Amino acid sequence: MAGHVEDPVSKLKELGIDLTPELEELKQVFAEISGKKIKLNSLKKTAIDKEIPPEVLSIAKALEFSDFSEKAMRKAEKELLKLVDRLIEEKNAGALFHAVKLLRLVQKGDVEGIRKLQED
């Protein structure tokens, strides 16, 4: 059927991947970026949300060691894009969330956000 697009969330659920907690947290991130407020009680926290993958933490730490140089930020962006692609293939939603979060912080040049990510 030309022009028909399936709902990606439903399709992922059919494949056994539930992104609901990650999507809710992503909504919160977008709300913070745009300045809008949403109810925090609508967010579901899972153990996966709290555990930042070592690959993501190591990139954040490498940026810190390089004093967040422009060159290091460009390299980190490239590596994070590769990591995101791999995590999509692995269907690892929790790790994917954290990788995308760091990717966006790098793309925005948000040094404080990157530091805060390591503390969480």
Image (tube, grey):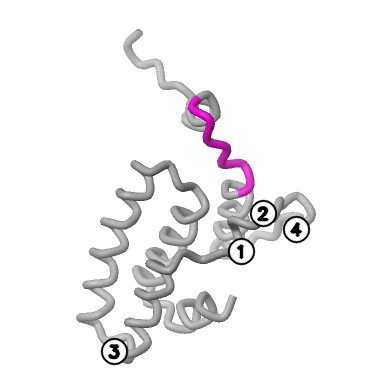
105 inside magenta stretch: no
First in residue order: circle 2 vs circle 3: 2
Q: Which residue is mark 1?
A: 50
First in residue order: circle 3 vs circle 4: 4
Give amino acid for label 1.
Answer: Lys
Gap between marks 1 and 2 measured at Cα: 7 Å
Highlighted range, magenta:
15-21
Q: Residues within 10 Å of mark 2 (few under 14, many from 20)?
A: few
**Cβ–Cβ below 8 Å for labels 2 and 4?**
no
Q: Secondary structure at mark 2?
A: loop
**Cβ–Cβ below 8 Å for labels 1 and 2?**
yes
The residue depicted at 53 percent of the width and 30 percent of the height is: 16
Residue 29 placement: quadrant = bottom right
Gap between marks 2 and 3 measured at Cα: 32 Å
Pick whichever, 31 or 75, lies toward us.
75
Residue 116 placement: quadrant = bottom right
The residue depicted at 61 percent of the width and 54 percent of the height is: 25
First in residue order: circle 3 vs circle 1: 1
Q: In the rendering, which numbered label is found on residue 106?
A: none
Q: Which residue is mark 4?
A: 40
Gap between marks 2 and 4 measured at Cα: 14 Å
Q: Main secondary structure of the magenta part?
A: loop
Task: Count numbered badges in the picture.
Answer: 4
Q: Position of residue 9 (x, y in %)?
A: 52, 32
Q: Position of residue 74 (x, y in %)?
A: 23, 73
Of tags 2 and 4, the one toward the viewer is 2
Gap between marks 3 and 4 measured at Cα: 35 Å
Q: Which residue is mark 2?
A: 46
Q: Which residue is mark 3?
A: 66
